[in-house]
Structure formats: C-alpha cells, structure tokens
Amino acid sequence: MSRLLIVAGLPWSTFYYHVNRLAAPDRNQSARALVLKIYHQHKGRYSYRHIRCQCQDCWLRACRNEGILLNGKTVRKLMKELGISGLSRVKKYRSYKGEQG
C-alpha cells in the first residue's frame, strides 16, 4: 500500500480521510426521508421554500424532537439528489397587444 501511495504522490492522511469518510453513516438520511414525505404529501407541488417552512412549522414537532432543522440550501441539495422539484406555474398566453395606431 505504501508503494502505491508513493507512486500516486498521495499522503497517508489523505488516503485515510477518504477511507473513513466512505465508511461514515449518511447524516442526511432522516432529512431525505422527511423531504420526500412532505413532497409526496402535497402531491409534488411544493418547492424547497415550502418544504423548508413545513419542516420548521410547529405542527411537525416530531422534526424538532429528532433534531432535524433544515436550511433552505440543504433542502435544495436533497431535492436535487432525489431528482424532485416543485411544480412551476405556466404563464397564461395573452394575445392583446394594446391599442394599435
């Protein structure tokens, strides 16, 4: 192993950092499940802002008891990883151009 690290020019500390990081449990697992639950509960209509508000809302006291307080950036990152996004409203077509003269 030491020869491989020398040839690759990689320090031992970097190697063990990555080994330990891969072995560590996923800390966003419960948050990921919560985001999916809220997303499906509202039929895929909620964006990251609404989901974050639902996580912080007082009716979900279970989230606070579990210690899940989510930042908006974290919710966006988790939604991107899960491949979900909120519905965006399609703008209505209006053909009126005003008074032509």
Image (cartoon, grey):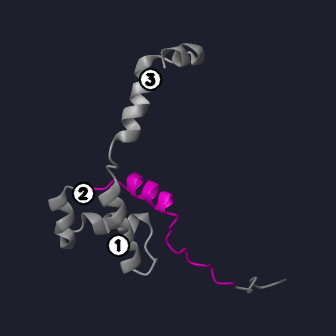
Q: Under tag 3, what secondary structure?
A: helix
Question: Which amino acid is tagged 1?
Answer: Lys
Residue 76 image offset from top left, x and y in percent: 45, 57
Looking at the picture, tell me which residue is in the foreground, 68 or 12: 12
Q: Under tag 1, what secondary structure?
A: helix
Residue 48 image offset from top left, x and y in percent: 42, 64
The magenta-colored residue range is 69-93
Check the image and report above or below for 37 versus 81. Answer: below
Q: Which residue is rendered at x = 55% and y = 19% of the image?
A: 4
- Residue most toward the right? 101
Mark 3 or mark 2: whose residue is earlier in sequence: 3
Q: Which residue is mark 3?
A: 14
**Is residue 86 within the magenta segment?**
yes
Q: Which residue is mark 1?
A: 37
Q: Which residue is rendered at x = 70% and y = 85% of the image?
A: 94
Mark 1 or mark 2: whose residue is earlier in sequence: 1
Pair 3/2: label in front: 3
Q: Which residue is rendered at x = 48% and y = 62% of the image?
A: 82
Q: Residues within 10 Å of mark 1 (few under 14, many from 20)?
A: few
Q: Which residue is mark 2?
A: 68
